[in-house]
């Protein structure tokens, strides 16, 4: 099969499209012919050699965690999925390789609704799982007032929509240029940065029940002030969480698992109540540009690679 890959850390230009060994669906797995795959900030950081303390890949390394495509192999013990079905989800990169390839084996998935384009579905898997996991940790439900710090980002805009769908009132931080976008998601925008607690208090004089940090911008102290209780704050991006008594949520950290959220998001998308915003989609041969766009960090939504 063909696959995007690199054999050393470096700039985006180390990425090449070349032949690679095909993965196959084992027990509990499904394999897809990939149509689109997301490019996450962690993909760019790993390629640049910034995550070597926690992740040392085998060479050559095929990047990509999120994927959407057509099922072409079904492993033993799998029910409810057939060859030819359209699905979206995520891979286990370290076990069977990344998703930026002709074929990929998914570790969790849901049926892709017609309302989702391939590009949207290809970038949704881990953003949805992460957002749902974090919302569950702090018990966001109907009637909750929740502050989402980083509401315009790849996970943030997903978390906003899912919280709104649960019946929560959402206040979302973002730059002034993103306030209109945050409003379109169903949240009340507020400027981030020093003085956040006072600005939020003016918007929610009755208090805030929970806060979710997806930006990792050093706001945990203020989020604790906003909620009045570190137990009501969760971060997915700030590794100083323990210092503030805040819960750090990541895949495999224990607690709620957000995989069930993929089917939830698919149902909301079919009803027109959820969208994965694609900042830009690049064909696979322009992967270096996609990685550069992610590293740049500007704009909102997800960067995606599309495959023929």
Image: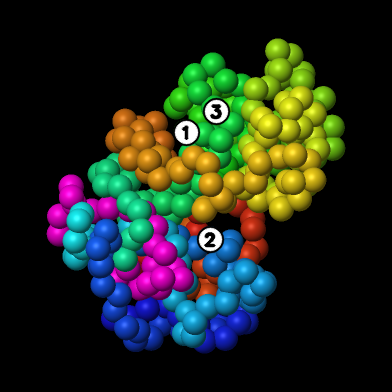
- Name the mark on residue 230: none
Total residue callouts: 3
- In this view, which residue lies farthest toward the top? 206
Q: Secondary structure at mark 1?
A: helix
Residue 157 seen from this side? no
- In this view, which residue lies farthest toward the left? 83
- Residue 140, position as x, y percentages in the image: 54, 27
Name the residue at 35% across, 84% down: 20
Q: Is residue 153 left or right of residue 173?
A: left
Residue for badge 1: 162
Name the residue at 75% across, 39% down: 245
Residue for badge 2: 40
Q: Are marks 1 and 3 in contact (CB under 8 Å)?
A: no
- Residue 79, position as x, y percentages in the image: 18, 50
- Depth check: 28 or 142 in front? 28
First-in-chain label (2 vs 1) = 2
Q: Is residue 98 magenta?
A: yes
Task: Give the mark toward the camera: 1 or 3.
Answer: 3
- Report crowding for label 1: few under 14, some 14 to 19, many 20 or more residues within 10 A (C-alpha): many
Residue bounds of the magenta highlight: 79-104
Name the residue at 44% across, 68% down: 93
Q: Is residue 160 magenta?
A: no
Quarter location, residue 37: bottom left
Q: Secondary structure at mark 3?
A: loop
């Amino acid at each position: 099969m063909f696959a995007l890959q690199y054999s050393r850390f470096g700039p985006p230009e180390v990425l090449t499209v070349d032949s690679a060994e095909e993965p196959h669906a084992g027990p509990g797995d499904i394999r897809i012919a990939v149509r689109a795959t997301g490019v996450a900030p962690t993909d760019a950081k790993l390629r640049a050699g910034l995550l070597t303390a926690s992740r040392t890949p085998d060479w050559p390394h095929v990047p990509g965690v999120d994927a959407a495509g057509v099922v072409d192999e079904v492993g033993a013990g799998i029910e409810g999925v057939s060859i030819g079905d359209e699905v979206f989800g995520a891979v286990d990169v370290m076990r069977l390789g990344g998703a930026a390839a002709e074929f990929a084996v998914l570790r969790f998935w849901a049926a892709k609704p017609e309302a989702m384009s391939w590009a949207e579905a290809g970038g949704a898997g881990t953003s949805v799982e992460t957002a749902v996991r974090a919302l569950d940790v702090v018990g966001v439900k109907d009637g909750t007032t929740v502050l989402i710090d980083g509401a315009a980002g790849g996970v943030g805009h997903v978390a906003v929509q899912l919280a709104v769908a649960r019946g929560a009132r959402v206040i979302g931080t973002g730059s002034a240029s993103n306030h209109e976008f945050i409003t379109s998601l169903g949240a009340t925008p507020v400027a981030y940065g020093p003085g956040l607690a006072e600005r939020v208090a003016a918007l929610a004089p009755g208090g805030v029940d929970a806060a979710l940090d997806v930006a990792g911008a050093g706001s945990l102290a203020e989020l604790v002030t906003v909620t009045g209780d570190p137990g009501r704050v969760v971060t997915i991006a700030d590794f100083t969480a323990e210092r503030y008594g805040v819960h750090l949520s990541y895949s495999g950290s224990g607690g709620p698992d957000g995989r069930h959220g993929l089917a939830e998001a698919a149902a909301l998308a079919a009803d027109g109540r959820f969208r994965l915003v694609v900042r830009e989609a690049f064909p696979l041969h322009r992967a270096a540009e996609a990685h550069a766009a992610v590293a740049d960090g500007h704009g909102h939504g997800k960067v995606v690679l599309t495959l023929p």
